[in-house]
Amino acid sequence: MRPLTLVEFEQHIVATNKLADRRDQWLQVALFGLMGEAGGVLSALKKEEREPGAQENSMAILAEELGDTLWYWGSLCLFSGVSPATVAEHVCRDSSNKTVPAENESAINLAHVESAVRLLELERNWTLSDALLRLGQAVGALFQEQSLLENAKNPDHLPLLQIEKLLAAILKAIAAVSIRIPVHLSVVAARNIEKTLARWPTEMIHVGLFDEGMPAYEQLPRDITFDFHEVGDGERGQLLLQSSKLNIGDRLTDNSADPDFYRYHDVFHMAYAVHLGWSPVLRGLLRVKRKSDSRTDENEDGARAMLIEEGITTWIFNYAARRDYFVDKDSIDFSILKTVKQMVRGYEVDICPFWQWEQAILDGYRVFNLLKNNGGGAVRLNLVARSLEYVGGTQ
């Protein structure tokens, strides 16, 4: 893999920075983000030292946290009006690294930075813990000089050299940590780009429907309407799901001592079908399992896949119930999305990026709240248009 240049990494930060037009928030988010991610790197290391092997892929987790740290570092560079390549040039110049392109800042890549830091540390017998401590100190030093950053673009107050030195110290420390994980700094940055674009893409292109090319009778319906009927006259609500006047599945209750409208949870399976092209549970309800392919039928549409989907749905529901069922929310905590991705690892839906999961969850709860507030109603799915629509009273 060709080493990533600092100019290319800067372009990635510009494309994914959602606060560029809100400078009052940008600095605080970037500063606290930098400190939080640096702390996350240390936390991941300490957990591994305390319980060796307890954390799956601990070095990969360290590298991921380090990539986020690098992103926030670059964001602070841009906030200050300093090019990441300029800061990298400082690091390389300090080491007298002869491999750095002379007078060509735009060509400096992360391999040059890593090489420079190796030269700077030839005589140092640092451990990973030592490097992490240096990272914490460098981030803390920048945090203490917050006023410099706040005035960085003020024509009457331009301590850019001092800011560049503080940012260079952080970059050196990040490189020192990457060397000791060990994973190349270019790989750390590339993985960060991949992860960030999976959550905040510059262009939203859905993964294709997984049953495309299968017989029509083994495909999830491309356009279908479901009716959510409240039935029964007891104290506890019962929900009957229908489509074209045909009953779908059994009558549902909340299955909880405290009524919470979980009986409407099939709408979440519908949202997965729309936004992910995936729902073993809905396939089972509609009897459209892919029986013509025995491996797919057993592995992707079988009982285990259905249990995983139900587990994800229940787990998120319990989380959402403490957050007003995501009313007026336009994002979900990244840790939730990462956990969901871990739960579906090895299944076909594993290739769907974070943003598709976020859309599926939020859209599902948008319609869930409409069903809950209106005592039922009709919901239309269009898998081609990727739309989930509450269409009012039952049909």
Image (cartoon, rainbow, N blue to C red):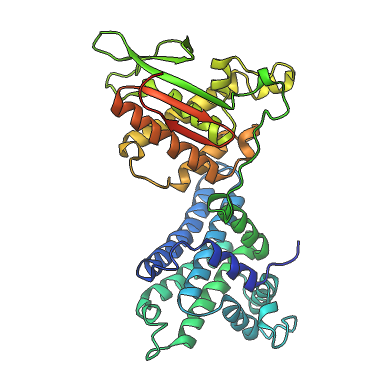
Residue extending furthest toward the top: 233
Tell me if residue 57 comes above or below residue 284 in the rendering: below
- Quadrant where the N terminus sits is bottom right
Image point 38% across, 85% down: which residue?
A: 154
Residue 173 coordinates in the image, percent (x, y): 55, 71
Tell me if residue 242 comes above or below residue 127 in the rendering: above
**Of the pair 44 and 293, the residue shown nearer to us:** 293
Image point 62% across, 17% down: which residue?
A: 288
Residue 214 coordinates in the image, percent (x, y): 72, 24
The quarter of the displayed image where residue 168 is located: bottom right
Image point 52% across, 40% down: which residue?
A: 357
Residue 50 coordinates in the image, percent (x, y): 50, 48
**Of the pair 352 and 328, the residue shown nearer to us:** 328
Residue extending furthest toward the front: 395
Residue 194 coordinates in the image, percent (x, y): 62, 54
The quarter of the displayed image where residue 193 is located: bottom right
4 on left or right of 322? right
